[in-house]
Image (spheres, rainbow, N blue to C red):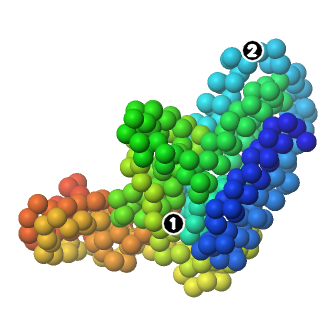
Amino acid sequence: MNYDSLAIASLLLLLIFVEALAGLYTNSKRSRDDWWIEIMGFVHASTVSKPMIVVVTAVLMAATVPQLNGVYSDLSLWVSLPFVVLTDDLIQYWYHRKAHEWKWLWNLHRPHHSGPDMGVLVSFKENIFYVMIIPNIWFLAVVTYMGMGSAVAIGLVAKYIIIFGAHSTLRWDQWLYKYSFLHPLAWIIERTISTPATHFAHHGKSSKDGVSNPTGNFSNMFFFWDILHGTALITRQYPVEFGIEKDPKDHWAAQLYWPIIKSRKPGSEIGEGYHRKKSGVNEPIRMDVVADKVYWWCACGYSSDQPFCNGSHNGTRYKPLRIQFEKDRTVSWCTCKQTKNPPFCDGSHLQLGQ
Ligand code: FES
């Protein structure tokens, strides 16, 4: 075993042990299916998917571009380490972001979000095909072949320290928010790396709680990618509910092996023949709204609770629009989603079908 793998495995075991002492595993809301996906996801990633990527890359490169073998082995770590770490993490930011916007990729990624609890093992709760096509792992395999293996090893240990910490229920960052003299440090840290608060927000069930950001906070190691791309939400709070809205609780095998194995749960988005339909409503909905109440307008058009969001936007580039009114009034909500003045009707539905 390499030293980096040993360090990562030791850290994982330590965190599992401390989480167990803290009662996570005895008080967990996880179902049997959730446990199976976490355990099997870990076994698959560490014994099949990731080793396969390294071996396939090395074989393919040896057969096609053997002159690149070790070509950068003399490169200074001062150059190779920032290059490897930043490139790897930026690629993963975009892969992860697209996993929430593209339907087929969302189907592969949704097991990571389907559990009701956080914990270090959630880091491995992934469909096996999602892991096999993670582009930054292929990138790491390529640069390893080219001689940057030391940078990859150091970068992976640093990355897993941050990722495990961001998923663990130990919530190491809570001390930063508790004492005001630590707030300037908290400000810097939460904008630099993923913390439990920002990553738990990504796993929160719905943005309607004002803390969760399931359509943002996509960063893995460095949180500044979310800051730079305008997808960040920092509240210094932790969601109460985790998981996916309208989750039919699919069998672990369907979550782990879709599309080879499909879910038999009625209405499941990873079920046989599932086809997501628009609401079919195009006429505006007139409604009396009350001052100060928060409304979440559906922007994607898939909600069956028009004009409001019901969580059906997963796997689209849309997210619900939050709106509050200063006084009681009557509004016409857009339901065709073509309005130029969201969330209100501007007559765009009259142009549909012409
Ligand atoms: S269901 Fe949430 S934006 Fe449409």
Q: Where is residue 206 in the image (x, y as percent from the top left)?
A: 42, 65
Looking at the rendered image, the quarter that the C terminus falls into is: bottom left
Dot 2 or dot 1: first in sequence order is 2
Q: Do the residues labelled 2 and 1 touch (CB within 8 Å)?
A: no
Q: Nearer the viewer, residue 185 or 198?
A: 185
- Mark 2 vs mark 1: in front: 1
Task: Please tell me the numbered disc located at residue 310.
Answer: none
Report the side of 258 relative to 219 (left or right).
right
Query: What's the distance in space between the residues labelled 2 and 1, CA to CA?
Result: 43 Å
- Quarter occupied by residue 309: bottom left
Q: Nearer the viewer, residue 331 or 73?
A: 73
Q: Position of residue 24 (x, y in %)?
A: 63, 66
Q: Can see residue 349?
A: no
In the image, residue 125 sits, relative to residue 192, either above or below, namely below
Q: Can see residue 18?
A: yes
Query: Mark 1 — residue?
Result: 242
Task: Please tell me the numbered disc located at residue 76.
Answer: 2
Report the side of 64 relative to 176 (left or right).
right
